Each structure stands twice: as C-alpha cells, then as structure tokens.
Amino acid sequence: MTPQGTALLHDNALNESTAFTSGERDQFGLTGLLPTAVETLDNQVKRCLMQLTKKPNLLEQYIYLNQLADENQTLFFKLLSTDPERFLPIVYDPVVGAACLEFGHIYRRPNGIYLSIEQRGKIREVLSHWPVKDVRFICVSSGGRILGLGDIGANGMGIPVGKMQLYTACAAVPPDGLLPLLLDSGTDNESLLADPLYLGLRRKRASAKDLDTFVDEFVDAVMELYSRCCIHFEDWKGTDAVRLLEKYKDKVCCYNDDIQGTGSVVLAALYNALKISKGKLKDQRILMFGAGSAGVGISDMIVSAAKLEGVSIEAARDQISLFDVKGLIEPSRTNLEAGQTHYAHKHAPTTSLLDAIDSIKPTVLIGTSTVGKTFTKEVVEAMTKLNQRPVIFALSNPTEHAECTAEEAYTWSEGKAVYAAGVQFPPVKLGNKTYLPTQANNVYIFPAVCLAVYTTASKRVPDELFIEAAKALADQVSTHQLDQGLLLPLQKDILKIEIETAITVAKKVFELGLARIDKPADIAKLVNASLYKPEYTHSKE
Ligand code: NAI
C-alpha cells in the first residue's frame, strides 16, 4: 500500500515531490504539504542543475547529489542520466575518494548496513533489519584499501554506496534490490582512531583468522536470507581480497571488482590495442610493472582469456612477467605471494626496468605500481624501439601516480604508443593528429555484468563472464575511434554500451548453464524488460 502524507515524501523510492499531481495530492494526503505548482520531472532536473552551479566545490556537489538520492531516487537517477560524463566522477572516483576521507564529518544519514565484528553470532539478525527482503546485490567493503587511500575503516562506506549508484546509472539495474554494506573489523588508521567524529569500531583491525570467521558468518547469513543475492567484494586489502575470492567464487554467487572488473576492462583495452598493433593475444610478451592485486588480477584475467583461445595455462603464464618494488619477479626471489609465483620465470635478478625491457622484449607494458613518472622517456623509447606500435598502459591512480601521462607516451613514442591510463587525460595534439587517450575504468564492466547476473539470476560470476564483457565492450569501439587511439567507448554513451554488453554476457550465462531461469527465445528482450527507468510511476491525470 502506498504510504500517505509525509511518510510518502520521506520514501525516496516513491517520492515525486513537486511532480505529484493535484489528484495524487488528494489521494495520498499531500495537499498543503507541497507548494502549489505541479512540475514535470524535467523541470525538477533544471532546478537541480541550477542548484548545483551554486555549490562551491565538487565535494559539496557530492553531498548535494547524495542528499537528493536520499530524498528522491527517480530525480537523482534522471539527473545523472542527463550527463554521465559530468556526474560519474562526482558520485564515484575521484570525488568519492575525498568524500570517504571526510565521511565521518559529512555524514547525514545511513545508506546501508554496518556489520561490526562484535556482532558475530547475530549477523543474520542484523542483516534482516534491512527493509528490503529481495536483496539481489550486496556491495561489501572492509574499508581496508579504498582507492589509493589505504585503510580508512568505516569511512569506506562511501564506496559501496557509490558503486551501487553506478549499477543503476550505468546499466539500469533496479535500485530497490541493492544493498551497500560495510563490514567493520576495526582500522589500523591511527588518525581515524583519534578522530572524535570517526563513526566506525574504535579498535585495531582483527586478525585474518578472525576476519575470515566473520566473513563466513556473513556469507552464510546472506545465502540464507537472500537466495538470489550476488556478493560484490570491493576495496579489501589485497591479500584479503585474493584469499576471499578464491574461497567463495566457486561456492556462492560473488565477484571481486578490483580483481575481475579491473582484469576485464584492461583486457577490453588490450583486445582493441591488438587491433591497432595487429597482434594476437597468444603472441604477446607482457611486462606488468606492479605486482599487487591489480597487476596479478590483470595477469590472471589475460591467462583465462588466452586459455579460452586454446593456449595452455603454462604457456599463457610464460607470456607474462611481473616487476615489483624489489625488481623483476624470478625464482630466486623470496617471500613471493601465492598469486605471484606462477609468473616467476627463469631470469637473472634485476631491479632495472630498462634491463628487464631489454631482455624480455615486451610488446605490452602495463603499469599498476602506484608510482608516478616511472615510465620515463628512456622506457617509452625502449618500448618504441622494440615495437612498431608499443602498447603502454599507465593505470595507477590518481593522476600524479600515473606511470606516464598520455602526452608523454605519445610525444616520446612519436605517436606510435597505443596508450591507456587509469585516469582520464585530455586529448593530445601531435603534428596534425589528435589522439584520444583511453581511461580503463572498471565502470564499463561491473554494472553490465551485474545487469546480466540480475536478469538471468546467475548462480555464479566466473571469469568467463568478465571475458565475454571485455569482448563485447571492445567491439563497441568504431574503427574511426581506434584510428584516434581510443580503445574503449566514450562515457557519454555508457548506458547504451552497458546494456549491449549485458545482453552478450546474459547469453553466456545461459550457455554456461548458470541461469536460474528458463532460457527465453529473445535474451535481448529479457534484459530490456528488466531495466530501471527514472520516471515517475504514479498514474498522472
Ligand atoms: P598494490 O599496493 O596491491 O600493488 C602495488 C604494486 O606495485 C606492488 O606489487 C608493489 O611492489 C609495486 N610497486 C610499488 N612501488 C614500485 C616501484 N617503485 N616500482 C615497481 N613496482 C612498484 O596496489 P593495487 O591494488 O594493485 O593497485 C595498483 C595501482 O593500480 C593503484 O594506483 C590503483 O589505483 C591502480 N588501479 C587502477 C585500476 C584501473 O585503472 N582500472 C584498477 C585497479 C587499480
């Protein structure tokens, strides 16, 4: 039953505010609670755009937008849809990073569930306090490694909230079944522990063993309460992220965006880079500069993709070398993480990237080192000497951490580099040609994969779905865009792109036998029928 009066105005999913017609105002006890004028959704959008121009900075715009989401969900998503290129960087990276740092200070009202390790034994009960009973996705973070900001404890809640907004804004996943969740097991961030406005558990992080029993109880409770729910692990400390994904990926419907989403979007950019360099995946020699969760996640995704093309796992791993803060990863190195050992190929020890390039002769160089300016002029020139079209991805965030800028890559390679970054660089003009640098951002992938999981009620989210998404995404870049160096589509078309990607991924879900629904004759129709539309639903006079 539709709530009445102020209860209706406080229900963000049903609130239409000044767009309630006079008939609806009578029907729902709203007469007098709203100004007299009856407006259209478009008019409300105009007011929001005008109010946004009065905000002094992007953080204030973030606060405004989130308040709007709390008050009127339809208007919020309609506003975002008017200019995704403008709004995505505000509701998500990079502005969400600043918002997370300030989270305890700018806090207005809760937007999800906070589970504390001290609630162990009662997790199911706490989860059941969420009002929606058919939860389809939970985006869960431990706040352990937020963007490039490290451990920010419960302040990390801004990330699941923002990511779930992107599910709807970028792929029209209905927002009512989305639950942002912060799993709070403490923080090792001393300044937060000393901040009187910090909103999380005031203790050091629990041990990995305690965290694992906490997560076990959480996963069991989710599966009991929400049988069709998919768990999205987001921004956990690297070792926790890898361990938990390994543990659960074949048991429950779950994925890790930092690992699989990153792997997939980089694979998409690589597929298109190979169209330009006219190479085949199986013939590449790839040097990963940075061997953390992103570097290893990308490597593993490339191996999975090569395996699907008939290459053995061993041969695919042989194509990839890793380089980290201590130098090239090779068998004499000690204390390697489990995921790194597969890539420790026979080679003399070296701490010089140039020496490694000289001997490995990579066709592709990918930076996930977190250290800016490490792809120097010499590095780019060495790659250009070895390759007609060197593939150089400088993925570290934020901008000052990029291993090299777009301008540096194009200038030092005399326009030959096939380049992507983790951040958006402006176009680069070299002679009479303009290059469009690519931003390899996970936002192109996870909403589409989730729309496919949602519509098919997939039981699992294996790498095959992310590889399918990568191919579908890559195929949406035109030859003209490739000529300009663009490896991924433009963000302004993101909704259309992701729906297209989701249709292809949904077909794969059926092909792999993972769907919990019967295969329809027309899968595109199935996906299109499930889309959320930011429109008012009450019948108008
Ligand atoms: P991480 O901390 O797990 O790994 C960093 C790696 O870089 C480690 O292997 C470390 O040994 C290595 N490293 C550090 N200093 C180095 C140096 N001077 N030379 C060579 N290697 C060095 O971090 P994670 O999660 O792997 O992320 C790495 C970077 O990638 C971050 O800047 C992150 O923002 C970015 N990233 C970008 C994505 C995208 O573009 N879509 C997605 C995920 C991460």
Image (cartoon, rainbow, N blue to C red):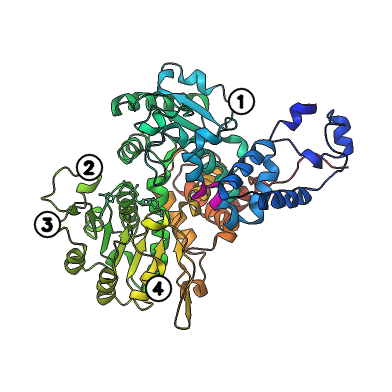
Q: Distance between the residues labelled 4 and 3?
A: 33 Å
Query: Which residue bears the numbered disc 1?
Result: 131
Please tell me whether mark 2 or mark 3 is closer to you in this view.
3
Disc 4 is placed on an element classified as helix
- The answer to which image quadrant residue 319 occupies is bottom left
Identity, as a three-letter code, of the amino acid under mark 2: Ala
* Drawn side of residue 261 relative to residue 325, left or right: right
Query: Which residue bears the numbered disc 2?
Result: 338
Q: How far apart are marks 2 and 4 (CA)?
A: 34 Å
Which residues are the magenta region?
A: 89-95
Q: Which residue is drawn at 38% across and 63% down?
A: 270
Q: Of the numbered discs in the image, which one, if any, rests on residue 349?
A: 3
Identity, as a three-letter code, of the amino acid under mark 3: Pro
Closer to the chain start, of discs 2 and 4, is 4
Mark 1 crowd level (few <14, some 14–19, many ≥20, 10 Å Cα): few
Asked if 49 appears above or below 246 in the picture, the reply is: below
Disc 2 is placed on an element classified as helix
The quadrant of the rendering that contains the N terminus is top right
